[in-house]
Image (spheres, grey):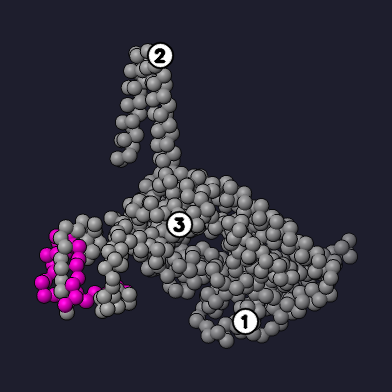
Amino acid sequence: MTNIETFLQHVTPAWMRPDSEDDIVISTRIRLARNFAHQAFPRKQNEESAKATSEKIASILQPKHFAYFTMEQLTPLQRLVLVEKHMISPLLAKRKFGSVLLQQDETISVMVNEEDHLRIQSLQPGLRLKEAYDAAAAIDELLEQQIDYAYDEQFGYLTACPTNTGTGLRASVMLHLPALTLTNEMKQLIQTMPRLGMVVRGIYGEGSENLGNMYQVSNQMTLGKSEADILADLQAVTEKIIAREKEAREQLLYRAATALEDRIFRSLGTLRYARTVSSEEAATCLSNVRLGINLGYIEDVAVDTINTCMMLIQRGFLQQYAGSTLHPEQRDTARAKLLREHLIERHTENNETNGEKGDDSYDV
Amino acid sequence: MICENCQQREAAIVVTQVNNGHQLKKHLCHECAANIHPFHVEQQHDTLHDMLSTWFGTPTWQKEKQPTKKQTVCASCHTTFEQFLQDGKFGCSDCYDAFRDHLPQLLKRLHGGTEHIGKMPNAVSEKAALKKRIELLRQTMRTAVEEERFEDAAKLRDEARALEAQLAGGETS
């Protein structure tokens, strides 16, 4: 069985690794909500039946090489790191009888006894709604062979919250939209989305600010619309947002190239040389540097490094790295140190290899 | 009418209590009625409104109205429809059955739709396919009867019955 440490040490999960030239969509997430028929939902469930649910799911998925962890056996810090990696939800971390089954490559996690008995989550890098959905549906079909799901001919899959009733499907894409934020177009976009049956939020869930210009767009409707239509509509809306963001970037370059370039390199400077950095400042600077890489201003930093840093600047990861609990001020210092290590070391490494290449070509 | 005390069993007895000259009528089931001591004054107030209404008295027409609103209760987890509206969450999958009549209106507001379209568990889709086949057999049977091909009709009837048995078997298991 896989140790929890393997999941915690590993900073950037597979779903965060850049796979395409498309630098606006960071990742795709699919979530299916399912419940056992005729059983109280987790909020009304007693300990015995909650544990039986966990064990039943574990007995099906463990042979398929899923690692099984109950919330009880994890420390608060371990749970926090899993939340920061988006492997479990903040709600599951708080559930006493919650548990999670993680696939080795971290693209699938099955949460047990969250708001519903089952939350099948599938994560993919970039815009890959179909792939992510198919992976989740495969697990769904595997489970339904041995579980009697709560399903109604009229209402579809029955869930604890009526906002998920029907398909139980929540499809979402994480988008990096610095130009639309800068030009103040996001507010308008956020307001028009509900009319399309969709929502835009900050990445840290409901009510969270758009930390680092990251947004999550997801479907709101789950009843009266098929899975295929939900995915197709989200795909279409996402493509439109991408086009708008690209337009806004071009306009920024046309109107205020120097100001933009200045902002990007100041951010890189902060990340490389600052001695204390708050999580908000780090997120903003990382967003600017990411934009700098996308626009070709910065060539010696990889997008992958930015993704790693985005994970590492979070409270749980910092403390795991430090190996102890940290006060907010200590965190800001530790954060600055980690960012320096990641951005300067890579920088000099790249310079050295470039130098060697230059030497080689000179020799030849 | 459902018992006003436990909100579960059918009310069978009307208990009249007199508090400070104020008459209080309660519709109760046998169990709950037996638990009420003749001199016991009930002081359970669910909400501020309930408390004030027992202090100052409420017009009888309002009192009659309230219990009917509370009547819908899920038999499996005892979640009342009011609780559901307050929490915004169901207690178990059987709540959907208990509140079925009220749900389309609510779900329409949330989703725009009221009927599930899309993926269903394999077992359910097999059942749906079976139902369709039975319906089809029935139709051909009726035309066979109309055309006075009674032997064919009898065969079709037997086939439909066999499928129905299969359907019923699947439902119980």
Q: Helix or strand or loop: what does disc 1 sit on? A: loop
Q: Position of residue A96 (x, y in %)?
A: 37, 68
Identify residue type, mark 3: Leu
> Where A26 sits versus B158, above or below?
below
Q: Chain of mark 2?
A: B
Answer whether residue A149 is magenta in the image.
no
Q: At label 2, which amino acid type do we have?
A: Glu
Tell me, yes or no, whether dots 1 and 3 are on the same chain: no
Residues at circles 1 and 2 in contact by the CB criterion of under 8 Å: no
Say few, some or many: other residues with alpha carbon within 10 Å of mark 1 (under 14 / 14 to 19 / 20 or more).
some
Q: Which residue is mark 1?
A: A278
Read off the magenta span: B21-47
Q: Identify which residue is drawn at 40% across, 36% down.
A: B127
Q: Chain of mark 1?
A: A
Q: Which residue does the numbered mark 2 point to in the structure image?
A: B147
Residue found at x 35% / y 64%: B83
Residue placed most toward the observer, A363 or A148:
A148
